[in-house]
Image: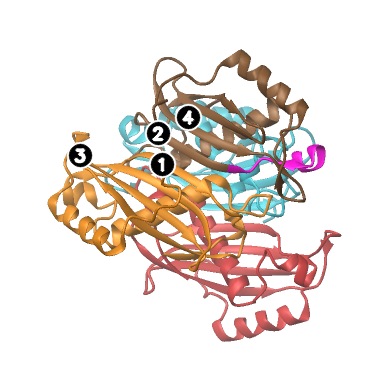
Chain colours: A brown, B red, C cyan, D orange
Amino acid sequence: MRRVVQWGDCDPAGIIYTPRAVEFAIETLEAWYRDVLEASWASQPTTHGMGSPVVHVECDYLARLPADQPVALAVYVERIGDASITYRIVCGDGAEREFFRARVVACCLALPERRPKPIPETLRRRIEAYAAAWGNGGTANKGR
Amino acid sequence: MRRVVQWGDCDPAGIIYTPRAVEFAIETLEAWYRDVLEASWASQPTTHGMGSPVVHVECDYLARLPADQPVALAVYVERIGDASITYRIVCGDGAEREFFRARVVACCLALPERRPKPIPETLRRRIEAYAAAWGNGGTANKGR
Amino acid sequence: MRRVVQWGDCDPAGIIYTPRAVEFAIETLEAWYRDVLEASWASQPTTHGMGSPVVHVECDYLARLPADQPVALAVYVERIGDASITYRIVCGDGAEREFFRARVVACCLALPERRPKPIPETLRRRIEAYAAAWGNGGTANKGR
Amino acid sequence: MRRVVQWGDCDPAGIIYTPRAVEFAIETLEAWYRDVLEASWASQPTTHGMGSPVVHVECDYLARLPADQPVALAVYVERIGDASITYRIVCGDGAEREFFRARVVACCLALPERRPKPIPETLRRRIEAYAAAWGNGGTANKGR
């Protein structure tokens, strides 16, 4: 996912407003569910009887990210559990430089019952294929 | 409604980001529905079988509104129609100075059918009492 | 500008949150300044000694705009004044259907002095060329 | 800091949109800098020749947080380093129930040079006094 940091994404310091980076990460993950898994968050309740609420998010800010900067955001699968998945979302300039790295843990919830359920097999297979193809997001900051 | 313009409300020019002023206005109107009308947007579908979607919004930016500025936001009822209401939301410093003025038109929609319906009598009476007590938001910019 | 309405753009009614449509319009206008005028808001103070603050915004909501809906946003120049420009931003499905129409008035401000100044000739010529090529955004709602 | 979860804070699932919780936490921290430390982020460059950029943020989502829910947000100081501070921000219902817990690490940056610098003594003393009075935010989730 490519985008340009916009004026309204930034605060008076001229760089991306802290929570907005987390929103970039979540928006990237949402686009990934929609375009790669073909299971958008809005469609999951009806097509899979489930939702994918986020139970944990974290973000390390590595470099100043100013307005007008083009960025590339990539999703990696760090770990596939029984009823939860850990993602890495990395925001860089498309080359060497990284601006921030987020980690997001989403679980799988049966709807409308609202209890944890295993990830449906169709989705699990797509996620595993993606993870096999693209890796887990590298080792940087792994020691946390 | 009183609040302080926060760091994240502002853009790199150090003043409130244009759409954020509209969000201030809508958040103020929402608080007004909840606290004055006692009909929060989230509760309307179940308690009144209706929703209050906004069909028009406009905002005039009158003065620079920087971070750390305390502001007071007031809701006025400009016009009560059969199935729609026009509000004025004025944001000032609590004294003479005005930062922005918004106008919001919300209609009354029967749910789940999604067709216009007259404003319920209970709500209409509360709105009329409020309008009688607080006026219509003054004459500034009225010629628009 | 094309995008997909995201989960986080929407409110509990499942459609775009009212102020978020205004933000879509402003983000589209910002991208237009950057990509078409080659004068991004962040670069204007240093390259042109100016800023382009918005003094008025309005938006008509014409149709329900739900999550996962792909939209196309277009910028039209409605009027070029001496020190201000009126834009139309139309959000549709790329075909016949329109979701919302915004109007934005931006003025030209000398920086750091903060007083109105005429639009620089280079920019004016680009804006006029664009207006000649793409029209003024049509007649719908023009009677406002 | 007390507030009510608003309609626009929520997504189509009817609960707070994931990144919005992080924004609640950052807004609470900002209000704390302004009201408790008397060193708002906007004023720090001129009054202390410094800024307080966030280098890490994380958030655990513990319970559904729906629209109209009143919440109380509290800031705790978890650790005061030489040039960085770790905060805990806890969002609950004011009684027993917790909705989310965030951790934010902010560093102290000399401006305009943009290099780490020790926290000014005046601020350090205020932070220590606050930490002594209010504790470190408890043990829940401490094992992370």
1 or 3: tag closer to the N-terminus: 1
Mark pair 4, 3: CA separation: 29 Å
Q: Which amino acid lies under the numbered mark 1 shown in the image of this protein? A: Val
Is there a contact, CB below 8 Å, between mark 4 and mark 3? no
Mark pair 4, 1: CA separation: 31 Å
Pointer 2 and pointer 4 on the same chain? no
- Assign a secondary structure to mark 3: loop
- Residue occupied by mark 3: D111
Left or right of residue D69, residue B2 in this image: left
- Assign a secondary structure to mark 4: helix
Foreground mark, 3 or 2, reads 2
* Residue range corresponding to the magenta coloring: A43-54
Q: Which is more toward the observer, D39 or D58?
A: D58
Mark pair 3, 2: CA separation: 21 Å
Is there a contact, CB below 8 Å, between mark 2 and mark 4? no
Pointer 1 and pointer 2 on the same chain? no
Mark pair 1, 3: CA separation: 22 Å
- Residue occupied by mark 4: C34
- Residue occupied by mark 1: D57
- Residue occupied by mark 2: A60
Foreground mark, 1 or 3, reads 1
Mark 2, chain letter? A
